[in-house]
Image (cartoon, helix red, strand yellow):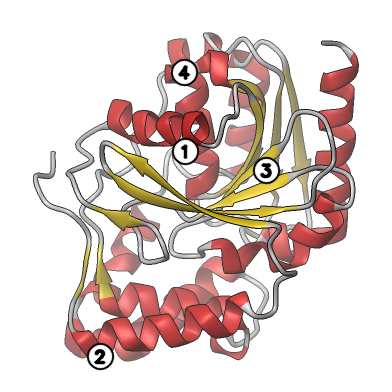
Amino acid sequence: MSERVGRFLSPDAERRFREAYSKGMRLLPEPAGVHDVGTAFGEVRVYRFGSAPGVPLVLLHGTNGTTVSWEPNIEPLAQRRTVFSVDLLGEAGASVQTAPIRNADDQAAWLDQTLEGLGLARAHLVGVSMGGWTACNLAVWRPQRVASATLLDPINTLARMPLGLILRTVPTLIPGLSRWATPRFLRYIDGQGTDPLAEPVGRVIDAAMRGYRKATPQPALFKDDSLRSLPMPVLAVVAGRSVIHDPATAQERARRLIPHVQAELWPEATHAISGQCADRVNERVLQFTAEVDSHQ
């Protein structure tokens, strides 16, 4: 349990991150609105795209990805839905943590307060990796707020993180090693054999990992009863080449425990699924949420 808040390690580290973040954000469509929503845990930055009627989509990015990571997804999604993209509180980004986030209830509380501040009684949540865990966590603690949850290869949600993944993060936390260890770790997670620093989102994640220290709790694997309790429709998409869990185990556990689930395993996808398979992800999200709305 943490009594601290996230922080940049130095002014230079913050400058480096802000530069990467600003360059990445310039590649996105112009937001229809920029909202800084006050919560008990800090101010949450949310970007709004599009103005379609109906229940909106709320995008929750993976660790350190920020809204920049949704660049391949926002414009296609916003053509048919109003899209809100949240910079997760407690990470480097445009959100500013001011109070400790101690546990899963606090994680749900800040997101619930954010949606309340935006005037969203209900929303379709779409989360990748840590964002998938965050979406599932809100669905467990505040189910009335969630019209549906799309979980894109969510971390520590459907299956446990392997020890090898945890050990690979250690060198990225050591200042003298992080310069070479972080790109190597990102290549391992991405799984596509490309240079992560060649892409804007990779540069954002690299700057965040090397220059920002989070103080949020590690995401705990959801218990069976928590997954069984989910009352809303859930789309669980597991990447077949993921390194963050055993893909077959994740799909099987989703099918076995979540009552109203469509659990899919995409064999060729890596953990970078939202960008790697952007066209397919976008169409699947729109199809799934349209199905949910048609049965409301």
Marks 4, 3: nearer the viewer? 4
> Which residue is under mark 2?
12
Q: Is residue 125 visible?
A: yes
Q: Nearer the viewer, residue 197 or 169?
A: 197
- Left/right placement of residue 281 relative to residue 30 reads right
Q: Residue at x 29, y 62 (%)?
A: 167
Residue 181 vertical position relative to residue 101 in the rendered view, above or below: below
Whole-percent x and y of residue 286? 86, 40
CA separation in Å, label 4 and label 3: 24 Å
Q: Secondary structure at mark 1?
A: helix
| Amino acid carrying mark 4 in the image | Arg
Query: How many numbered discs sit on the rendered protein?
Result: 4
Q: Looking at the rendering, which quadrant does residue 250 occupy?
A: top right
Marks 4, 1: nearer the viewer? 4
| Amino acid carrying mark 3 in the image | Val
Residue 129 vertical position relative to residue 25 in the rendered view, above or below: above
Q: Secondary structure at mark 4?
A: loop
Q: Residue at x 64, y 80 (%)?
A: 26
Q: Earlier in the sequence, mark 3 or mark 2?
A: 2
Q: Nearer the viewer, residue 33 or 212?
A: 33
| Amino acid carrying mark 1 in the image | Thr
| Amino acid carrying mark 2 in the image | Asp
Q: Looking at the rendering, which quadrant does residue 260 occupy?
A: top right
Quadrant in the picture for the C terminus: top right
Determine contact: label 3, label 2, CB under 8 Å. no
Q: Earlier in the sequence, mark 1 or mark 3?
A: 1
